[in-house]
Amino acid sequence: MEKVVVENLWNGDRDAQIQAAMELSRFSSKQRHKLGESGVLVPLVSMLHSEDYEAIEASLCALLSLAFGSERNKRRIIKCGALPVLLNHLHSQSQTVVQLTVAAMLTLSSCKANKVAIASSGALQHLAEFVNSGDIQLQLDVVATIHNLSTCEEIVPLIVASGIILSLLELVHNSVKSSPLGEKAIGLLENIVSSSESALCEAASVGGAIRILVETIEDGSSLGKEHAVGILFLICQSCREKYRGLILREGVMPGLLQLSIDGTRRAKNMARELLLLLRDYSDYSSRQKQMNHELIERIMEEIDADGEKLADAKLRLVEEMIAKLNT
């Protein structure tokens, strides 16, 4: 069976090639690994150059099958020259081809040896265009692909140059904050800004960025809140004098105090670190602000006194005090 597939991929007519490519997905991982070594990647990549959508889709599905679970095949696909034609297919008229191409980029980008080649090919600019496409699965795959690439430190400047910071903030703003897409987007944003000072400065300077982060602390998933408070902490830490007032004016305190009680372990720690940067008002323009400050200080004292865990009665008291900040 394997010999027939190889023969048809190399020498078969259009229909035989398409059928052979489709057969690949039915093979075991051991068989697919063996086929990758046999040289079938060459005719499969050649099929990508076709103008026949059916042939392109069959080839992409076969390449995905061969790449799945095989770092060697992922490297071989790039070495066979697949990258330029994959970039072309990101602008295909066929939505199925676009989706399969992004899925292929996601799979190939998970291989450490491929990351620099993909990033330096210009792929980031193409991928950034899909961040706010409206196709949720496509957006998830694009965000995951860029996240894969962002784990390589030397690629981060290229990611920042692609304009992804603004796109991610827009995506988080337009998404349901607690959704998987919102969570992945804010996670990628934190990963980038924690690796690049220029990315952090750019994110902080975007109009409405701090408000978006505060809203995510209030309405995001557990991980989303963790990422959002991490970014806000980095922004405030980078220039407390500049950003402290901006963050406070967005009404961050209730959400931040709540997060310091019931967030993930890291979120609690980051929330408390940020609270330390934000506390100690010295200028009260109104009696209400002074009262709010005094209430915040009381909440902080209760949290600090009990450390990681608050007793049920103390927890209810703290939550009641936090609720007063929202009134």
Image: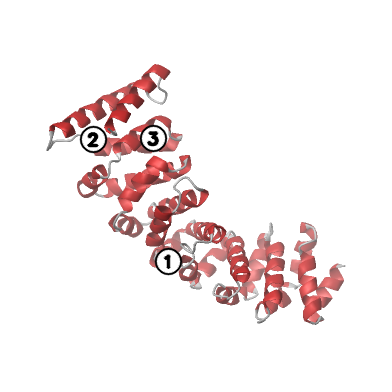
Q: What separation in Å lies between label 1 and label 3 (alpha carbons)?
A: 33 Å
Residue 138 rendering spot, x and y as whole percentages = 55, 61
Q: Is residue 34 left or right of residue 121?
A: right
For residue 259, the mark is: 3
Q: Residues within 10 Å of mark 2 (few under 14, many from 20)?
A: some
Q: What separation in Å lies between label 1 and label 2 (alpha carbons)?
A: 37 Å
Identify whether 14 is placed above or below 181.
Answer: below
For residue 158, the mark is: 1
Tell me how many marks there are.
3
Residue found at x 46% / y 53%: 185
Q: Badges 1 and 2: C-beta atoms under 8 Å apart? A: no
Residue 11 rendering spot, x and y as whole percentages = 81, 81
For residue 279, the mark is: 2
Q: Is residue 206 left or right of residue 70?
A: left
Tell me the amino acid under the disc marked 1. Leu
In the structure shown, which secondary structural element does the residue marked by tag 2 occupy? loop
Split into 4 quadrants, where in the image is the C terminus? top left
Q: What separation in Å lies between label 2 and label 3 (alpha carbons)?
A: 16 Å
Residue found at x 47% / y 42%: 223
- The mark closer to the camera, 1 or 2, is 2
In the structure shown, which secondary structural element does the residue marked by tag 3 occupy? helix
Answer with mark 1 or mark 3, whichever residue precedes in sequence.
1
